[in-house]
Amino acid sequence: MTLPPPRPHLFSAAPFPEGAKTTEGQEAAFFEHYWGQRPAFLPGALPGALPLDGNELAALACEPAAEARLIEGTAPALRLRHGPFADEDLEALSFERPWTLLVNAVDHWLPGLATVFEAVPFLPPWCIDDLMVSFATAGGSVGAHEDRYHVFLMQLEGLRRWALAPGPAQLAHHKTVDGLALLSPFEPTATLEASPGDVLYLPPGWGHHGVAEGPCLTLSLGIRTPTAAELLEALLDNALERGADPTPLPLLPTFGALPGHPKGPSQPLREALARPLLDALWGTEAPTRSLAAALTRPPRQAPELETRRSEPAFHRALHRFKALLPAPGRRWQWCEDGGQGWLISDQVALPCPLDEKARAPFFRLAPLREDALGSEAQRAFAWACYEAGLLLFPDE
């Protein structure tokens, strides 16, 4: 498998009128005027085909470890079924009736889809959740709903009509139908039609209802940031991995005002516990790396990598395939700690000896192409990333 040429920036084909003509200006305009505020429709922003069609999506939906759903009918009368599915389940579906097949984390099964990430270099690697793909027949939809995260909806095949409404909607408008969180009533304020290559950005809380106008394939790139509880859980897990600090917490005489406790100077509880608890969560030696590890914790378990090459074989494969791909489910983040640069991915921490310019190709969650690795030091660090399980070749 040879990767296609690098994908153009998402904003290059559909620049924003508010931005300058440079890429940096377009990114600045997007974050200032759209991100988290209102939708942005980008016609023709994702040109070129992807290595996926409806038949391959159906095959993935039958994999035992796949996260697949089938939604039949039209809103509000929808029926939800969870996969994995048997071949006969999907073969029995009629193209004359409305239904939608969705598979999460498709990039776990088809790492070549990581070329999509080349179009969004302005997104930090740690915040990209997954690539979900849906196939729908005419009239198929998942119903009107809101998401709690940023999302880029990329039309791959066919036509889909979108209806949009600002939100979040009143609590009384949220209904649960056969396990689906829907909006009812849904009162859209705008509609648009997405053709192949078109991209729709939606901020969290915006109501949307996408209905297929014929057989169509849509890719959803979800952008998530953790809740406070999720981040605390990840930090706590990492703290326990490092080993418990045997130092007792300073609870005395903090509670000196309570009956039975010794008298003496007493600190407020929050003041007394804040520092030791934060030190326990962050780690006193590498707090920045602790945060990066927590942020890059995989949201779901990825398939095991079966094929691993020796270092000489790695360099031969790099010359053959011309690129490496992000390993399924891996997210990473660069950070500086103690004067040292690090590439962090969950429990993997790789010290990086490269200068700022040389390490730039490793910043993004996207194919690492051979022509970006012009020095021996860069290729050596690419090998370190591969050996740590962060990268793979297209045949792996």
Image (tube, rainbow, N blue to C red):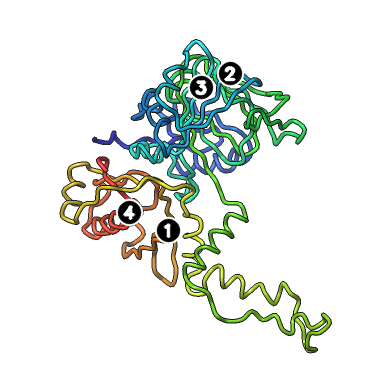
Callout 3: helix, strand or loop?
strand
Q: Position of residue 220 (x, y in %)?
A: 49, 33
For the residues labelled 2 and 1, the Cα–Cα distance comes to: 45 Å
Q: Is there CB contact under 8 Å for labels 2 and 3? A: no
Cα–Cα span, label 4 and label 3: 37 Å
Q: CA distance from mark 3 to mark 1?
A: 35 Å
Question: Which residue carries the number 1 mark?
Answer: 334
Quarter in which the N terminus is drawn: top left
Question: Image height check: is 379 above or below 173?
Answer: below
**Between marks 4 and 3 in the image, the one whose residue lies nearer the viewer:** 4
Please determine whether, in this image, residue 294 is positioned above or below residue 221: below
Up the image or down, 133 lies above or below 331; here it is above
Residue that numbered label 2 is attached to = 73
Q: Is disc 1 in contact with disc 4, using a CB cutoff of under 8 Å?
A: no
Residue 358 on image: x %, y %:
31, 57
Front label number (2 vs 1): 2
Q: At label 1, which amino acid type do we have?
A: Trp
Q: Secondary structure at mark 1?
A: strand
Provide residue 379's location: percent of width, then percent of height.
24, 55
Asked if residue 232 lies left or right of residue 186, the reply is left
> Foreground mark, 2 or 3?
2
Residue ID at (54%, 34%): 201
Residue that badge 3 annotates: 194
Tell which circle, 2 or 1, labels the residue nearer the N-terminal end.
Answer: 2
Q: CA distance from mark 4 to mark 2?
A: 42 Å
The amino acid type of the residue labelled 3 equals Ala
Left or right relative to 144: residue 138: left
Q: Which residue is mark 4?
A: 389
The three-letter code of the residue at mark 2 reads Gly
Numbered badge on residue 33: none
| Label 3: how many Cα within 10 Å (few below 14, some 14–19, many 20+) | many
